[in-house]
Amino acid sequence: MSVRHTAAGLACAFLMARGRAEGLRLLDGSAATAWRSFLAMLIAAPMYLGLKVVSTPPLPRGIDPVRLVAAEAIGYVVSWFATALVMLAVARVLDREARWPLFVAAWNWSNVVQLAVFLAAAVVASALPAALAGGVTFAALGYVLWLQWFVAREAFVIPGPRAAAVVGVDLVLGLFLSGLTLSLGTAR
C-alpha cells in the first residue's frame, strides 16, 4: 500500500464529503484500488474505538468485557467486507457491476469521514443536555446518510431514488450486523 494510494483515497473521501463528485477521479476504479481501500478500515479503527468508548453506557453486571470487545472487533471487520459483498449483488441488480470496484473504494474511504463525524458528534453530545444531544446526533446521522447517498449515486451513476435504496440496504445490513455483534458480545 503506497502513501499515494492512501492520500488519493482520503482526498476522494474529503471531496465527496463536500459534495464534490470529482473526488471519484482520484480513484481508478480497478479491483486493486477496491482492495487497497480496505486500508480505510485500519485508519478508521481508532475513531470507531473512540466512538464506542464515548457512546457505550456502562456494562450491566455479568457481561464479560473481553468477550464484548472481541465481538465488536470481529463485527467491525466483518461489516466492512460484508458490505462490499452485499453491494456486489446490489451492483448486479442495478446493472452497475463494472462500477462496483469504484463504488467499494469510494464507500470505504468515505467511511473514514463518516466515523469522524459520528465521533465528533458523540463527543459534543456527551457534553450537552439530553435535549440538545439528540439534535447533534440526529444532524450527524442525517449528514452521514446524505454522504452515503451521494457516494452511491455518483459512483454507481444512478438516480437519487436508487441511491437511496443502496443506502437502505446498507442500513439494514448494518443494523443486522450490529444486533448480531451485540448479542454475541453480551451472551451469558
Image: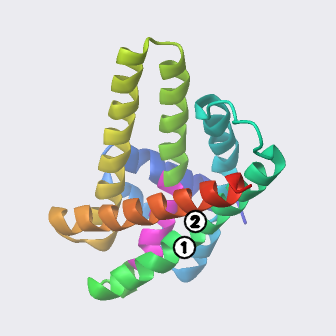
Give the Cα distance between marks 2 and 1: 6 Å
**What type is the residue that disc 2 sits on?**
Trp
The answer to whether residue 186 is left or right of residue 122 is right
Marks 2 and 1 in Cβ contact (< 8 Å): yes
Give the residue drawn at x 56%, y 23%: 123
- The residue where tag 2 is placed is 80
- Quadrant into which the C terminus falls: bottom right
Mark 2 element type: helix
Task: Pinpoint residue 133: horizontal percent, then vertical percent.
Answer: 41, 20
Q: Is residue 162 above or below residue 186?
A: below
Depth check, front residue: 119 or 153: 119
Give the residue drawn at x 49%, y 37%: 118
Give the quadrant of residue 8.
Answer: bottom right
Task: Pinpoint residue 12: horizontal percent, then vertical percent.
Answer: 46, 54
- The residue where tag 1 is placed is 82
Task: Pinpoint residue 19: horizontal percent, then vertical percent.
Answer: 30, 46
Depth check, front residue: 66 or 12: 66
Q: Is residue 174 visible?
A: yes
Which residues fall within the magenta stretch? Answer: 100-110
- Magenta-colored segment: predominant secondary structure: helix
Give the residue drawn at x 68%, y 30%: 58
- Badge 2 local density, few (<14 within 10 Å), some, or many (20+)? some
Is 138 within the magenta?
no
